[in-house]
Image (tube, rainbow, N blue to C red):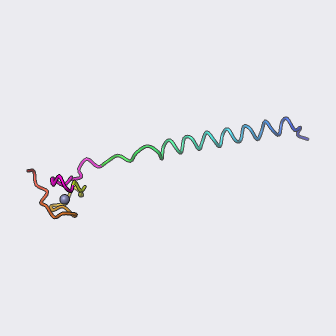
Amino acid sequence: MMTLAELVMMITIVLMVAIGFGLVRSSRSSSPAPRQPADRVCPNSQCRHRNPSHAVYCARCGRRLGTD
Ligand SMILES: [Zn+2]
């Protein structure tokens, strides 16, 4: 038969393990997803829309995403 002290100790250990797992998971999920460096930011200073790397024209303002 388990004593009350043993039961409390077990619950404490289970809680600590659960909190430990929670911290590990939250620290992983809270880390920001890496921005794709290939994204093409619109050269229009009024827009600055982030377009996919394959985009030729800005999806928001229609400006050509050239090297200029
Ligand atoms: Zn734009």
Q: Identify whether 4 is placed above or below 48.
A: above
Q: Residue 12, percent across and down?
A: 74, 38
Please tell me which residue is depicted at 47% across the width and 45% down the height of the picture. Answer: 30
- Closest to the observer: 13 or 32? 32
Quadrant assignment for ligand 1: bottom left
**In what quadrant of the picture does the N terminus appear?**
top right
Please tell me which residue is depicted at 19% across the width and 55% down the height of the picture. Answer: 46
Q: Is residue 13 left or right of residue 54?
A: right
Q: Is residue 33 left or right of residue 17?
A: left
Q: Is residue 64 left or right of residue 27?
A: left
Spot the residue most to the front.
Answer: 46
Q: Residue 18, percent across and down?
A: 65, 43
Please tell me which residue is depicted at 20% across the width and 53% down the height of the picture. Answer: 40
Q: Identify whether 19 is placed above or below 54.
A: above
Answer with the quarter of the image where residue 5 lies: top right
Spot the residue most to the right.
Answer: 1
- Closest to the observer: 16 or 62? 62
- Closest to the observer: 64 or 37? 64
- Closest to the observer: 13 or 48? 48
User: Range of the magenta residues?
Assistant: 36-47
Residue 45 part of the magenta segment: yes
Residue 15 part of the magenta segment: no
Answer with the quarter of the image where residue 10 lies: top right
**Count of labels shown?**
0
Please tell me which residue is depicted at 35% across the width and 46% down the height of the picture. Answer: 34
